[in-house]
Amino acid sequence: MVIFGASGDLTRRKLIPALYDLAAQRRLPMEFAVVGLSRSPMSHEEFRDRLRDALEEQRDGGVSDDVWESFSKGIFYLAGDSRKPETYEELRGFLGELDEERGTQGNRMFYLSSSPSLFPTIVERLGEAGMNQGEGGGYARIVIEKPFGRDLMSARELNAGIQRYFEERQIYRIDHYLGKETVQNILALRFANGIFEPIWNQHYVDHVQITVAEDIGVGTRGAFYEEAGALRDIVQNHLMQVLCLTAMEPPVAFDAESVREEKVKVLRAVRRMDDGEVERSAVRGQYERGWVWGEEVPGYREEEDVDPSSTTETFVALRLFVDNWRWAGVPFYVRAGKRMPKKATEIAVQFHAAPHTPFSRNGTEGLEPNVLVIRVQPDEGVSLKIGAKVPGSGFEVRSVNMDLLYGSAFLEEAPDAYQRLLLDLMLGDPTLFIRADETEGAWSILEPVMKHWSESGEIPFYPAGTWGPEEADELPERDGRGWRRP
């Protein structure tokens, strides 16, 4: 595995810890090797020491000397500029040496963890150097980190550039949300249980809410966020993928093409907005100074590397419709934001209220419609709100929750998302990775929203520690509904 941008944060915090865990579970072959590539001059040993230090910081010293000694023997470093052709000649020669020394059999995985602006150049250089194919019958695969472009046009250009040198079966567009156990459990809940699928449609479902809330601000990522914003950072990828898994039809098999084809069908069915619809169904916001968990925090414009007059959104709320037979007329309310009151990612499916209850009005004052909630993080699990009789001599009915907590239901510790995805990458299973037409489909939905917002210089504000601007509350309120509080 060759990691471009190996001196970056992703390598230290996610990739190497995930590979170390796979090694500790004996899921990596002894021949496996990692080659980090970036411009910083460094020896193999210095690179290994940096990675070990970062791993120990995350694990509070819980790193096995035996596992690390065996794993780190396969870690190497190459200093070079990923824009220069000579770097790739040196890399190809070094990988050939590793084939002989470690028996890696010409298999190559190129992980692009560098700046997205370098993606087209790296792909082109790999192709020109002949590394878009494995050596001696081995395979070559390339991993593209998000964001997959900045808009529909750039996504198409990026896909076309990659496909000039790599076939689609070699391309792995990674979204770590798809590696989360609870995200995958959306499919298990729907398609492994006969009680849910018959009611998973517009006849029984009133509306769906998907929330991706973070209590943190942008921190040291101010410069990145100024370029991206919440729409590009969260909605286009994470949130759209969760929407697809929630709304998709049952695939004929749990394989890459079957699953991804059903997700693409959802994206094609999502109603596109015109300017008037954007005004009614899309809200953005930016956090200002406020209080989170009892601590006063700065506003977005006060953060490091942020323009003091920035109109970049840190909150997005959308009302979407999936215009197909299953979901016709059912609104999907989706929102994502920073500096919310708490960290929470969940999918809430609210069903129609019972058409008639034979109980007295006073006895059903606390009764709410049934809601199925899939909690992705934290407190991963599933909750079903049902009506139940309150103990006592009277007949009072109110809503209660039936909860399944994954942590207590299963003894196995859930693997990190990157751990699962990197293993699938090595096995050549792209089911949990994103196909080219998925990325373009998601951008095509959001393109009118981005265009409308780019032409508008105004942005609503919300105090840090709240659930977004007041305008966001109007999205469900216009339909006689309201946001639920995770």
Image (cartoon, rainbow, N blue to C red):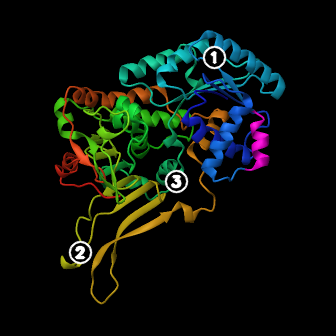
Asked which quadrant contains residue 315, the reply is top left
Instruction: Answer few, some or many: residues within 10 Å of disc 2's Cα (few below 14, many 20 plus, some between 14 and 19).
Output: some
Residue 159 drawn above or below residue 343:
above
Callout 3: SS: loop
Kindly identify the amino acid type of the residue bearing the numbered disc 1: Asn
Q: Which residues are magenta?
A: 64-74
Query: Do the residues bearing badges 1 and 2 touch, measured as CB atoms within 8 Å?
Result: no
Q: Nearer the viewer, residue 84 or 346?
A: 84
Between disc 1 and disc 3, the foreground one is 1
Instruction: Answer few, some or many: residues within 10 Å of disc 1's Cα (few below 14, many 20 plus, some between 14 and 19).
Output: many
- Residue 339 locus on image (x, y percent): 34, 49
Callout 2: SS: helix
Left or right: where does residue 251 sit relative to residue 73?
left
Q: Residue at position x 47%, y 50% from top? A: 186
Q: Nearer the viewer, residue 241 or 6?
A: 6
Kindly identify the amino acid type of the residue bearing the numbered disc 3: Ala
Residue 407 drawn above or below residue 83:
below
First in sequence, mark 2 or 3: give its number. Answer: 3
- Residue 293 locus on image (x, y percent): 37, 59
Q: Which mark is residue 192?
A: 3
Q: Total of numbered circles in the picture?
A: 3
Q: Which mark is residue 177?
A: none
Q: Is residue 203 visible?
A: no
Q: Find the distance from the CA under tag 1 to the CA under tag 3.
A: 39 Å
Instruction: Answer few, some or many: residues within 10 Å of disc 3's Cα (few below 14, many 20 plus, some between 14 and 19).
Output: few
Kindly identify the amino acid type of the residue bearing the numbered disc 2: Thr
Q: Find the distance from the CA under tag 1 to the CA under tag 2.
A: 65 Å
Q: Which residue is mark 1?
A: 132
